[in-house]
């Protein structure tokens, strides 16, 4: 069984964590072919039975559609895994695909885009076309929650039997011993990109109401530059894997006001090292976090501020949520995620 994995998004947020987990936990005695960009092709060391192929082609481009299929096809794969919705529709072989969420179906980012309006509209049409074709042609579709599965069924008429829900994990890639606080004084922490659906503006308003520091961690220069300016906000940018645990450990709480997600890794990461999570009241978060998180109305900065304040002053509640958080985070495992994924490979190939 010769399986290919498109690893071009190795260093991206969210999907990069997913790809790196596949690399770490897939069985080393099986034959895999990994397709990498220049940086990963040079730096990633492969097990003896694995092969890497250089693919200097960016996602969401014409070259991805017109050139990449034949690079994949040359490897004579039994199955190819696209761990992101973008895939070359001309690829002739069998494949499985991971569609993490359908946020782009719900939230327009055109006014934030660097593209002219007409080109953005064409790109969005291309997105819908690729999704329709992938749902029709894929041997199996991976997604990250039942909420996301229901979206695929509703929006693209995906067969329920074709969609495999496999949960991700919040296990940090590097933990290490406790270091000093990376930021003086009590602070709220947000980890992730700054795309519009993340609703960071509401968190900034809540921080201003509370007169409390908000640290924004994540590499996303384009969208971060469009956030409202505030003396209470520190945009930290990218943090190395071996440093992120201390940002969680020393935060008063991890907060996220997302209006929609496919899963949501950062709150589980926070819970895994004893940081309470205060999050949006959306279905997928209830599915993933249960009663281990505290919920607020993501559309109301005053409610966000109220819930954060009431949580932080209640030491007994913080202690209870911390214990629940440890238990909830422990329910999710990258090893199990990848083992389940490999089982689908075997059946589909």
Image (cartoon, rainbow, N blue to C red):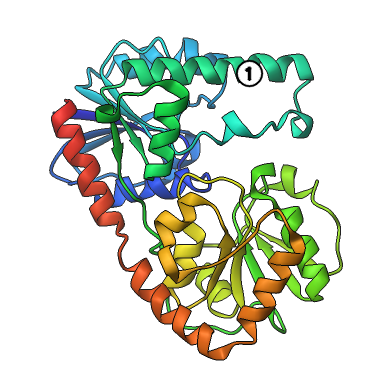
Give the position of the C terminus as an image quadrant: top left
Q: Which residue is drawn at 46% across and 21% down?
A: 131
Q: Which residue is nearer to you in this view: 38 or 334?
A: 334
Q: State whether residue 31 is above or below residue 238.
A: above
Q: Quadrant of residue 213?
A: bottom right
Q: Local crowd at mark 1 within 10 Å, few (<14), some, or many (≥20)?
A: some
Q: Residue furthest bottom?
A: 315
Q: Which residue is drawn at 40% across and 81% down?
A: 323
Q: State whether residue 58 is above or below residue 239.
A: above
94 horizontally vs 284: left or right: left
326 horizontally vs 155: left or right: left
Q: In which quarter of the image is residue 312?
A: bottom right
Count of picture labels: 1
Q: From where the camera sits, is residue 76 visible?
A: yes
Q: Residue at x 70, y 20 (%)?
A: 120
The percent coordinates of residue 170 (x first, y second) are 41, 61
Q: In which quarter of the image is residue 34?
A: top left
Give the position of the N terminus as an image quadrant: top left
The percent coordinates of residue 16 (x first, y second) are 46, 45
The percent coordinates of residue 222 (x first, y second) are 74, 42
The percent coordinates of residue 79 (x first, y second) are 23, 24
Q: Which residue is drawn at 61% across and 79% down?
A: 311
Which residue in the structure is indicated by mark 1? Answer: 123
Q: From where the camera sits, is residue 55 visible?
A: no
The secondary structure type at the circle numbered 1 is helix
107 horizontally vs 75: left or right: right
Q: Which residue is nearer to you in this view: 309 or 38?
A: 309
């Amino acid at each position: 069984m010769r399986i290919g994995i498109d690893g071009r998004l190795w260093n991206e947020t969210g999907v990069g964590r997913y790809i790196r987990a596949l690399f770490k936990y897939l069985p080393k005695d099986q034959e895999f072919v990994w397709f990498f960009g220049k940086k990963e092709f040079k730096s990633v060391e492969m097990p003896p039975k694995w092969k890497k192929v250089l693919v200097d082609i960016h996602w969401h481009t014409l070259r991805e559609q017109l050139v990449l299929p034949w690079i994949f096809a040359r490897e004579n794969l039994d199955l190819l895994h696209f761990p992101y919705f973008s895939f070359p529709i001309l690829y002739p072989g069998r494949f499985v695909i991971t569609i993490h969420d359908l946020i782009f179906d719900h939230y327009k980012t055109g006014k934030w885009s660097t593209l002219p309006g007409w080109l953005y509209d064409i790109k969005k049409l291309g997105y819908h076309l690729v999704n329709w074709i992938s749902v029709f042609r894929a041997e199996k579709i991976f997604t990250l929650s039942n909420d996301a599965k229901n979206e695929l069924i509703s929006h693209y008429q995906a067969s329920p039997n074709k969609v495999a829900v496999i949960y991700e994990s919040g296990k940090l890639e590097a933990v290490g011993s406790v270091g000093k606080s990376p930021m003086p004084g009590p602070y709220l922490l947000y980890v992730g990109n700054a795309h519009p659906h993340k609703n960071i503006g509401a968190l900034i308003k809540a921080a201003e109401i509370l007169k409390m520091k908000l640290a924004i961690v994540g590499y996303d220069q384009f969208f971060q530059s469009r956030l409202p300016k505030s003396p209470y906000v520190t945009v930290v940018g990218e943090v190395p894997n071996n440093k992120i645990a201390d940002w969680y450990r020393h935060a008063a709480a991890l907060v996220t006001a997302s209006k929609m997600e496919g899963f949501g890794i950062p709150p589980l990461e926070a819970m895994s090292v004893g940081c309470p999570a205060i999050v949006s009241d959306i279905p997928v978060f209830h599915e993933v976090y249960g009663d281990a998180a505290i919920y607020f109305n993501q559309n109301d900065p005053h409610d966000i501020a109220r819930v954060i304040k009431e949580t932080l002053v209640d030491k007994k509640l913080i202690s209870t949520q911390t214990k629940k958080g440890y238990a909830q985070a422990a329910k999710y495992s990258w090893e199990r995620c990848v083992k389940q994924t490999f089982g689908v490979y075997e059946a589909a190939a």
